[in-house]
Amino acid sequence: MTDSIIKQYYDALGEGKLLGKKCKKCNEITFPPTTACQQCGSPDQDWFELSGKGQLLFVSHSMAPPPNPRFNEIAPYAYGHVKLAENLFVQAVITGVEVDPDTLRAYFERGPVPVVPDIKNIQGLNILAFKVEEK
Ligand SMILES: [Zn+2]
């Protein structure tokens, strides 16, 4: 049931957990979870809780208005590419960084920076975000 996977994913986010699916056939992890393995398409998957540990590879921000009005609440915000410990890549809101060009460029020049999940609840919806722990 697709609805059930989505609901469980968002409910877990609310508890600070990142839930994905792990394929029983090829062991690939699919995150965010879907009904079929992203690698081989098999529907035969188990729930898998990700460590949440990641490295921020690239962070930027957009001058454009948020894609959805609900994001106005946290705008302006940084957005970045995170490589998770499980070797998965996600794009998410990045917190704990100043949203100004010089700061963002400095992160780019520094290379990967450790991040941890920082789930935001915006108007009742849990949003996956990551926080930079060291400045
Ligand atoms: Zn698979």
Image (spheres, rainbow, N blue to C red):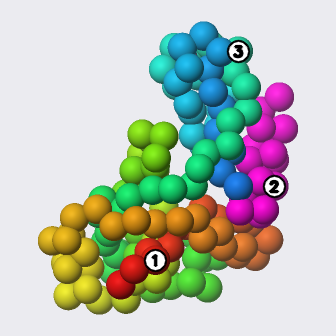
Mark 2 close to ligand 1, CB under 8 Å: no
- In the rendered image, residue 8 lying in the magenta stretch gets the answer yes
Q: Which mark is residue 113?
A: none
Residue depicted at 15% across the width and 71% down the height: 109
Among numbered discs 1 and 2, the one appearing first in the sequence: 2
Residue depicted at 20% across the width and 87% down the height: 102
Circle 3 sits on which residue?
44
Which amino acid type is marked by label 1? Glu
Of helix, strand and loop, which mostly describes the magenta segment? helix
User: What is the distance, in whole Å, between disc 1 and disc 2 at their CAs?
Assistant: 24 Å
User: What is the distance, in whole Å, between disc 2 and disc 3 at their CAs?
Assistant: 22 Å
Residue situated in front as seen by the camera: 83 or 114 = 114
Please determine whether, in this image, residue 90 is positioned above or below residue 47: below
In this picture, which residue range is highlighted in magenta? 1-16
Quadrant housing the N terminus: top right
The reply to whether callout 1 and callout 2 are in contact (CB within 8 Å) is no
Please determine whether, in this image, residue 90 is positioned above or below residue 96: above
Looking at the rendered structure, the secondary structure element under dot 1 is: loop
Residue situated in front as seen by the camera: 74 or 46 = 46
Circle 1 sits on which residue?
133
